[in-house]
């Protein structure tokens, strides 16, 4: 219904009444849970109302809330909630589920990518009973399901009807970034641009500097596509030039090497496509590099051991920090990542089929550490962690492999491959939104080798929505093939 009249069918009405009666009964006998059930009642009623809208206004408000959400502890528990984004995402996901349940099956069209992500969620659910901590895995699964429902399926549902809606979403996030970055830099200046303070000044909107820089890097391709749009007038072009400069400055002061490497990889891919280097030649170049690295492996290892460029040094500029990527000698950040990756591989060897459960890496990996691989920033307890020493596997792929096992890992790779392999188009033929989505996804995929952020709402939205933009031509291709 889009007429403005609220209609609740009999089945939904009876279920709502039944739930309300249960909530009242539980609240009467167990007062501690009354507030929870009251809030859930409000969420369900709101979802029923929203499910009869076109979701556009809700999506705009939700996306705007992503940037400015703040983490609040839940009284009486060790848990926390991000306000206002998480309640909005829960209600939006429920509303979309209600809309889909009331939609005839014949009208629901799924392409290959959709089926793969549904399969991924199914197998992730199957790993929960084998988790080392079921409660943590259930919570982690619910969060992941909410993100997939909102950022993938609802985004695709909306963008099929309103193709330009994603542009407005990005305008909201870009405007918020351009406003806040100068303020973050101002705060950072008070610390004399100390790299250790890079994660402090971006709070409470971002948990650390790596998440902040990853988020900004996603916006760079979008901004550049707007600058090089030949049909755009002068004033908007100047705004996007200014925005791009602000984003780059923000990324520079974030001191995140993974983001810098991602941007360099994106630029290299753009150059290869601009020069029209074909797939075959690209494969030959990559194989040549791989063979050279194999023959020079011993020399490269010695070079890495002798490398003393330390990313944590106070005077380390961007050149030193990039060179420190290969430092296997005394760069604690690099060595700790190797420690975490090694632990993840040992965890996989121990439980290859179902892993240790979603959300459990940070609790399960500690016994898998070897003294010879531990660093001064390694931890021996998952509680009361010193800031800057937390995190999980620091690799999206090893994280899902160690937490969920081989099957979800393979499905995730197939999902990404299905989205990207279809797009064998020339750079000149790409639309602006396609370029932004494609290069944004590439930059993030490079970043996933060093960090994992798909469990955060800001980056999850940008990544899944980018994949949606890339799968829309795939869905159209499959529909045309079946005609």
Image (tube, rainbow, N blue to C red):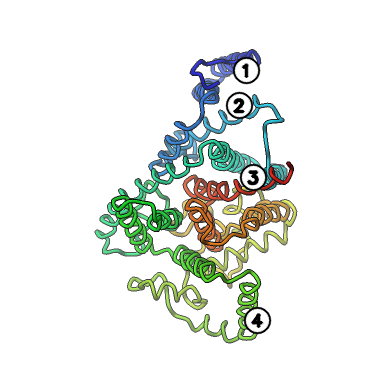
Marks 4,2: beta carbons within 8 A: no
Quarter of the picture holding the N terminus: top right
| Mark 3 neighbour density, 10 Å: few (under 14) some (14–19) many (20 or more) | few
Which numbered disc, 4 or 3, marks the residue that appears first in the sequence?
Answer: 4
Q: Position of residue 352 (x, y in %)?
A: 73, 57
Gap in Å between the C-alphas at discs 1 and 3? 34 Å
| Mark 2 neighbour density, 10 Å: few (under 14) some (14–19) many (20 or more) | some
Q: Is residue 369 above or below residue 135?
A: below
Q: Check disc 1 and report the residue beneath it.
A: 12
Gap in Å between the C-alphas at discs 4 and 3? 40 Å
Which numbered disc, 3 or 2, marks the residue that appears first in the sequence?
Answer: 2
Marks 1,3: beta carbons within 8 A: no
Gap in Å between the C-alphas at discs 4 and 2? 54 Å
Judge by depth and name the residue closer to the eye, 67 or 336.
67
Q: Position of residue 88 (x, y in %)?
A: 47, 33
Q: Check disc 3 and report the residue beneath it.
A: 476
Q: Position of residue 19 (x, y in %)?
A: 60, 18
Gap in Å between the C-alphas at discs 3 and 2? 25 Å
Q: Is residue 134 left or right of residue 235?
A: right
Which numbered disc, 1 or 4, marks the residue that appears first in the sequence?
Answer: 1
Which numbered disc, 1 or 3, marks the residue that appears first in the sequence?
Answer: 1
Gap in Å between the C-alphas at discs 2 and 1? 9 Å
Q: Secondary structure at mark 4?
A: helix
Question: Which is in the foreground here, disc 3 or disc 2?
Answer: 3
Q: Check disc 2 and report the residue beneath it.
A: 98
Quarter of the picture holding the C terminus: top right
Q: Check disc 4 and report the residue beneath it.
A: 291
Examine the image and state in which quarter residue 60 appears.
top left
């Amino acid at each position: 219904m889009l007429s403005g009249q609220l209609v609740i069918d009999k089945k939904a009405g009876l279920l709502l009444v039944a739930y309300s009666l249960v909530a009242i009964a539980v609240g009467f006998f167990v007062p501690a849970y009354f507030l929870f059930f009251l809030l859930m009642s409000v969420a369900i009623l709101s979802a029923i109302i929203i499910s009869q809208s076109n979701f556009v206004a809700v999506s705009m408000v939700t996306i705007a809330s992503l940037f400015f959400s703040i983490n609040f502890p839940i009284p009486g528990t060790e848990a926390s909630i991000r306000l206002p984004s998480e309640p909005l995402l829960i209600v939006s996901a429920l509303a979309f589920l209600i809309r889909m349940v009331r939609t005839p099956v014949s009208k629901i069209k799924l392409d290959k990518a959709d089926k793969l992500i549904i399969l991924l969620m199914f197998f992730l659910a199957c790993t929960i009973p084998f988790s080392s901590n079921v409660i943590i895995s259930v919570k982690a699964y619910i969060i992941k399901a909410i993100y997939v429902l909102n950022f993938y399926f609802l985004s695709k549902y909306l963008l099929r009807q309103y193709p330009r809606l994603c542009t407005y979403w990005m305008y909201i996030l870009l405007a918020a970034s351009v406003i806040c970055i100068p303020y973050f830099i101002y705060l950072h200046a008070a610390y004399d641009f100390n790299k250790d303070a890079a994660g402090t000044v971006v709070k409470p909107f971002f948990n650390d500097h790596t998440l902040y820089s990853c988020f900004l890097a996603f916006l760079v391709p979008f901004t550049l596509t707007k600058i090089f749009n030949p049909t755009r007038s002068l004033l908007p072009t100047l705004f996007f030039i200014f925005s791009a400069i602000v984003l780059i400055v923000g990324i520079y002061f974030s001191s995140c090497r993974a983001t810098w490497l991602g941007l360099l990889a994106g630029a290299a891919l753009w150059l290869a496509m601009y020069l029209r280097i074909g797939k075959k030649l690209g494969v030959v170049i990559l194989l040549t590099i791989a063979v050279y690295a194999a023959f020079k492996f011993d020399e490269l290892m010695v070079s890495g051991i002798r490398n003393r460029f330390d990313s944590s040094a106070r005077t380390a500029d961007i050149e030193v920090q990039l060179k420190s990527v290969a430092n296997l000698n005394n760069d604690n950040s690099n060595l700790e990542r190797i420690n975490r990756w090694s632990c993840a591989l040992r965890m996989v060897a121990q439980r290859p089929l179902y892993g240790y459960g979603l959300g459990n890496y940070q609790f399960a990996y500690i016994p898998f550490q070897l003294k010879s691989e531990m660093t001064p920033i390694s931890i021996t307890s998952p509680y009361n962690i010193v800031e800057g020493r937390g995190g999980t596997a620091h690799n999206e792929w090893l994280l899902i492999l160690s937490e969920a096992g081989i099957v979800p890992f393979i499905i995730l790779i197939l999902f990404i491959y299905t989205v990207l392999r279809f797009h064998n188009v020339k750079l000149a033929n790409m639309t602006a939104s396609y370029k932004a989505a494609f290069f944004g996804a590439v930059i993030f995929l490079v970043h996933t080798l060093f960090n994992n952020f798909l469990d955060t709402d800001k980056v999850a939205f940008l990544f899944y929505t980018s994949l949606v933009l890339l799968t829309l031509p795939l869905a159209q291709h499959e529909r045309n093939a079946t005609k």
